[in-house]
Amino acid sequence: ALAYADDLVLLSGSWAGMAVNLRILERFLEHTGLDIKIKKCGGFFLRAPNQIVTVNHCADWSIHSIPIPWIGETQSYRYLGVDVSPKRGILPFDPRKEILPLLRKISKAPLKPTQKVKMLLTYGILRVVYGADMSLVGTVGLRRVDLEIRNAVKSWLHLSPSTADGLFYSAKVDGGLGLPRLEKQIAICQVKRWCKMMQAKDAKCKVLAPALLPKAEIAKRWKVATEVEVEGSLQASLATTDPAVIGRKWRVSEFERWCGLRCQGRGLATFARDPISNNWLGDPWGLHESDYILALQLRSSTVSTLTTLSRGRRRNTTCRACGRGWEGIIHVVSQCRSFKKNRMANHNNICRLLSIIGRTLGWEVKREKRITCPLLGTAVPDLILIKNGRGLVVDVAICYEVKPATLRRRAESKVNKYDKFAPSICNTFCLTGVKTYGFVLGARGKWYEGNSEVLSEMGLPRSRKKALAKLFSARAIRGTTSILKVFKK
């Protein structure tokens, strides 16, 4: 078996003290069976007699009688992704120079778009975070890195260059991709660390902290991390502010700005804090890559329709498919006559899935049964479920989420429509009671919470409700993307 113990640093206040530390290290290696690669090691010794700093003016250190290489005054040693110089400390770090080769390699890799994004999040960005943090890279430099990352992700996911930043930086629970924004998060990490230093329980650390803080940078980083100017003494603010609250809501701010956009923010408030409707963003199970990409365009309202392409210009936006109405996303998905059969197929797929669930739970399922009442006329609910003398009337609808109340109103209209036919349904099927529901889904994957009541009435176990809700959400999205694929042909 092989074991690696990397990135070990030894510190001492004198040459003799370091020699003692190295003897301790030798004994540790003997007891554990580990070894040292002396060529990968390095050390330096600073002394300042008469205020003149000298470097390495001393005898060699050694491990097992092998001399340790010296790091000269003009040399540096790479440690945890940053270059450290004996005199200058941590050297300036260029995160853009570091990230660009990584982005090019990921772009060339034979991976799916979602896999490229996952690789960037898991491995790529982490390669530059520590160096950017420790070397105090400026806000402008970090902003450039964020721009390169956004452009790469847009290219991989075939998103429009005009796609709002909110899609990338909003939390996944709010409908974003949850990418890190280095301009923000590096500053947040730094301010949190400085707060912890100023509030350290160790007395010596607390006394030394003010001298170790980069005074020229604190105010800038504080403003970026907290989005407010510091009031009073900055050191006093660091000593009294709870590190846990710093930068806690920056993703919420990104989402709110996204929602505030006139075109791309339409209907986004519907998806706030909704882990079910937004589950597909982090786990695209049930969606092909093409569906995932179109779903992102749907969520950000950047599907290439005439209305989208004509923003800010006076052009004819009449629908090319049906010749009626303006060619916008809502029209194509919900109203265009040319795609009526596709919408019906999506609707029927949801009904079919509900029917399967009902039969599995022991219900007798009636699909599109005509119910006639002399006074009210005829109604054709999508599903009538019968079990033990009671019935459930469920009518399915898929509509575009324009406002938070859109799905609720559609569900209420379904209930109001079929409630009137409850006595006729009871008489037709010899039932003691009937409950009516609207089972409503959003075209962009919104799960209406009232649907959970339908699943509960059907007797679905609580453990399965959440999983099925995610499945229905993904099915609704696939139905919409299938329309868009036909539209784009």
Image (cartoon, rainbow, N blue to C red):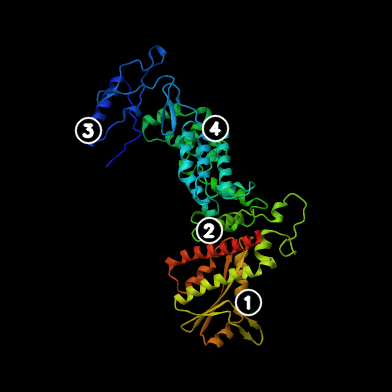
Quarter that holds the N terminus: top left
Report the residue marked by disc 2: 288
Say few, some or many: other residues with alpha carbon within 10 Å of mark 1 (under 14 / 14 to 19 / 20 or more).
Answer: some
* Label 3 sits on residue: 30
* In this picture, residue 123 sits left or right of residue 224: left
Q: According to the image, label 1 marks what residue? A: 417
**Chain-order first, disc 1 or disc 3:** 3
Mark toward the viewer: 4 or 2:
2
Where residue 375 sits in the image (x, y, percent)?
66, 86
Residue 244 locus on image (x, y percent): 46, 43
Mark 2 to mark 1 CA distance (whole Å): 37 Å
Q: Are marks 1 and 3 in contact (CB under 8 Å)?
A: no
Residue 98 lies, in percent from the top left, at 50, 35
Q: Which mark is residue 300?
A: none
* Residue at x-position 51% and y-position 75%: 355
Mark 1 residue type:
Lys
